Image: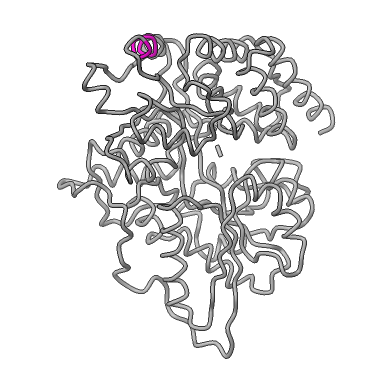
Amino acid sequence: MKKLFPVFSVLLVFSLLLAACAKPTAAPATEIPQAATEPVEATEPAAETITLVVWDQFYRDVESQVMETLNAEFEASHPGVKIERVVKTLDDLKVTLKLALAQSDGPDVAQVNQGRSDMGAMVQADLLLPLNDYAAQYKWDERFSTSVASRNSFTPDGKTFGQGNLYGVSPTAEVVGVFYNKGLFEANGWEVPTTFDEFEALLAEIKAAGITPISFGSLDGWNAIHEFSAVQHILVTSEYINDFVYGVNNVSFDTPENQEAARIMQDWVDKGYFTDGFSGIGYDDSNKLFKAGEGAMTITGSWQVGEFLTDTDQTFGFFLLPSNEGNTRMAIGGVGIPFAIRKTTEHADLAAEYLDWMVSERAAELWFQTGTLPAMPLPASAVVEEGTLSTDALNAWNTINRENAVGHYIDWATPTFYDTIVAELQKLFGKTVTPEEFTAAVEVDYAAFLAGN
């Protein structure tokens, strides 16, 4: 999951594609298109089956379908190779993966969440294979900018984030913004706001109309980070967010801007802008409510586009949370959870081939066809249609890249920050602490990390 960095090379590719598309096609399909050609050159038939164990967290229906298709096509082009896919939730991965990678029969390939608490800790434990040589072999630098690669990089001791060896490649890109129900907006004459003041005025208007302004459930904890941080990102500078996440220049979490973001969260709670009973509603359940038309908007990431295109009679759009004049329009974003290789795997070369397939043009095509932003370039033949939810998300991604306004997932900041921020946000949303007490409590974790690092 998942915030802000320099303009990525992905933007250049997307911009060229948008300029080249003179004739749009139908809206992105949720069915997976069949491969026109063999995905990769077939290898010689193996004498016996080689099983490549892969753990991923693409458990939702649409994204799981992409993985099943890619795996089947990889097997078809590699006679004698079988992909043993194990699907985990992100929370399950965080709990079980480090121990599994330490086992001789652990996964050969797994998605490893970025940041110190996951990837950094696994690098420090010497569990992940450096991918520098494979990156050169497969020319991944032609698909990913240095800034994108830095999000999946650590020094060999696992202590310095954003530099050193490459340990993973990400198949998808992400931007956190506002999904809105087009039908409700049109029926009530509501317009997409262009400033944060307009956004808050819209919340009040929606509430007055008897409709839930923001569909939200905080039971799972992690998505509350995005709710808070989406507002935080339009109040702070990109320099601050970069320094904070990379642990440089001795910045603090206990700042007026972070206190203001916390105050806004509690103000929204007081005014009933969130779903009634949100503290007892899970993330997936809140999204189901939104898909059913319960709520005018929801604040979450572009990874939900595919889900919001299926099994619903509602029509949705997507926009970036706007900032007021004088503030930086910055959004949580970046690349998705990367695939990494267990250092002790006996099939490192095959695993690297698999990673290359996961970030191929074919993979990019499948992800975009199902409403997910690919981190790698689309095929030259790809087209996009304006006015669709997928293109809304693509345009949002292009905008924050163009404006150098790609933010960070702040839970990457320290190895323990995820647990700390989740616990303190539960108190904040529950109104048991003040904004000042919230930022001070979180700062204890961050200051201790800086002192020990």
* Position in image of residue 285 (x %, y %): 48, 37
**Magenta: main secondary structure:** helix
260 or 14, which is in the foreground?
Answer: 260
89, above or below 67, in the image: above
Rendered image coloring scheme = one colour
Quarter of the image that includes the N terminus = top right
446, above or below 123, in the image: above
Is 54 in the magenta?
A: no
Question: Residue at image x 39%, y 46%?
Answer: 372
155 or 120, which is in the foreground?
Answer: 120
Question: Residue at image x 47%, y 33%?
Answer: 286
Quarter of the image that includes the C terminus = top right
* Position in image of residue 197 (x %, y %): 40, 9
Question: Residue at image x 79%, y 28%?
Answer: 450
Stretch in magenta: 201-207
**Name of the residue lying farthest toward the bottom:** 47
402 relative position to 140: left or right: left
Q: Quadrant of residue 53?
A: bottom right
449, above or below 54, in the image: above
Q: Quadrant of residue 225?
A: top right
